[in-house]
Amino acid sequence: GFKSKVTVVGSGNWGSVAAKLIASNTLKLNSFHDEVRMWVFEETLQTGEKLTDVINKTNENVKYLPGIRLGKNVVADPDLDNAVKDANMLVFVTPHQFMEGICKRLVGKVRGDVEAISLIKGMEVKMEGPCMISNLISEQLGINCSVLMGANIANEIAVEKFSEATVGYRHNREIAEQWVKLFGTPYFMVTPVQDVEGVELCGTLKNIVAIAAGFVDGLDMGNNTKAAIMRIGLREMKAFSKLLFSSVRDSTFFESCGVADVITTCLGGRNRKVAEAFARNGGKRSFDELEAEMLQGQKLQGVSTAREVYEVLSHRGWLELFPLFSTVHEICIGHLPPSAIVEYSEKKPKLS
Ligand code: NAD
Ligand code: 13P
């Protein structure tokens, strides 16, 4: 019978773990080709070797996921066109800021019958307004695109600790079931939800909340303050999502992609970690500088997402409805001190 071919576009920290999860399943399931192709944005390591060659030789992404075997059936490929040309299932998982360029390069290069899924937490803001990454992929490439989001710190899933995730799909439940089959393992429990926008906005917006939580940590404010920030953040996530898309469901915020991802990212994520350092330095060292120093090539999504959301809020006259989101941005760009993160709430947000 027909066997699906899977390509993973991206090979960072989460991208590599996604390839490992998928590769463990394609070996077991007859409906998929064993081989999983993984597009690698090529770079030369300090040893002088190419990252792709090292991955294919050692079966390990030594830069972005050291110490973890990906599975022998993962093949790293530095050539984007070649990596996608035969695939009929495409998994997009790069930092969101690179997706516009990647989509442009892929126009006309993917199969017409391809199904896509985005694991990318972030959005683009265009003249016409906000554009979710799944929508960018759909529109640029003329293909259907689902999303997978959740409380998924990559390094924990890499060592097979139990977690849950949410697949958001648009119309076709069978396609969602295919993705659940491809990703799900006993330690990675995936639930489909018919709410692409809700699931993707949860994954995107929680990164702003995580920056706020990091500020709170850097100010040594304690657990009650952090819980308050998480609650207010979740409320702004829901309000903003519903203002953008009236179809977004309340129940989505109780899935892994909602409250659970807010919690895990505010406790153990990279956005939290770098924001803590930013606040400890009194905002005197920039996020770019701290990111480069602390994350070894991995990328933050929360700072640019805060800016993108701020653009939408100011353009639509919604700034005072979202004091947490807007304050995070103003702190990131140095217009407010980190301590402002707990002062904004005195402004009495007008959300119900
Ligand atoms: P990452 O943070 O490890 O970023 C590094 C990757 O970016 C590397 O593969 C690098 O080659 C690539 N890169 C650098 N410059 C590039 C360029 N100019 N063009 C294309 N690629 C370039 O990436 P990640 O952790 O895999 O994150 C990808 C997405 O997954 C993000 O949206 C993130 O929010 C989301 N996510 C991450 C985690 C996690 O724990 N890491 C968990 C869930 C979701
Ligand atoms: P960070 O990018 O803050 O590490 O968050 C990872 C994540 O999305 C966990 O679900």
Image: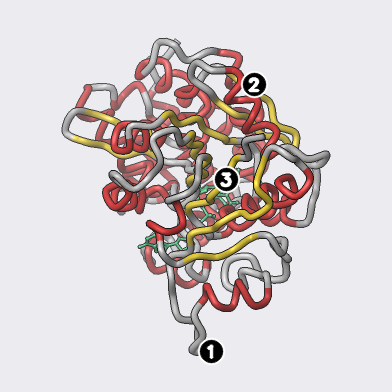
- Given residues 178 and 269, the one toward you in this image is 178
Q: Which mark is residue 47?
A: 1
Q: Amino acid at mark 3?
A: Lys
| For marks 1 and 3 on the same chain, the one whose residue lies earlier in the sequence | 3
Q: Nearer the viewer, mark 3 or mark 2?
A: 3
Taking the image as shown, residue 10 lies to the left or right of residue 264, namely: left
Residue 65 % position (x, y): 63, 65
On the image, numbered disc 3 is attached to which residue? 5
> Is 283 located above or below residue 350 in the figure?
below
Q: Amino acid at mark 2?
A: Phe
> Is 145 located above or below residue 317 in the figure?
below
Taking the image as shown, residue 339 lies to the left or right of residue 190, namely: left
Indicate the secondary structure of the residue bearing disc 2: helix
- Given residues 258 and 27, the one toward you in this image is 27
Image point 29% across, 37% down: which residue? 140
Image point 60% across, 40% down: which residue? 4
On the image, numbered disc 2 is attached to which residue? 254
Distance (Cα) linking label 3 and label 2: 33 Å
Indicate the secondary structure of the residue bearing disc 1: loop
- Given residues 221 and 62, the one toward you in this image is 62
Indicate the secondary structure of the residue bearing disc 3: strand
Distance (Cα) linking label 1 and label 2: 46 Å
Residue 33 % position (x, y): 65, 47
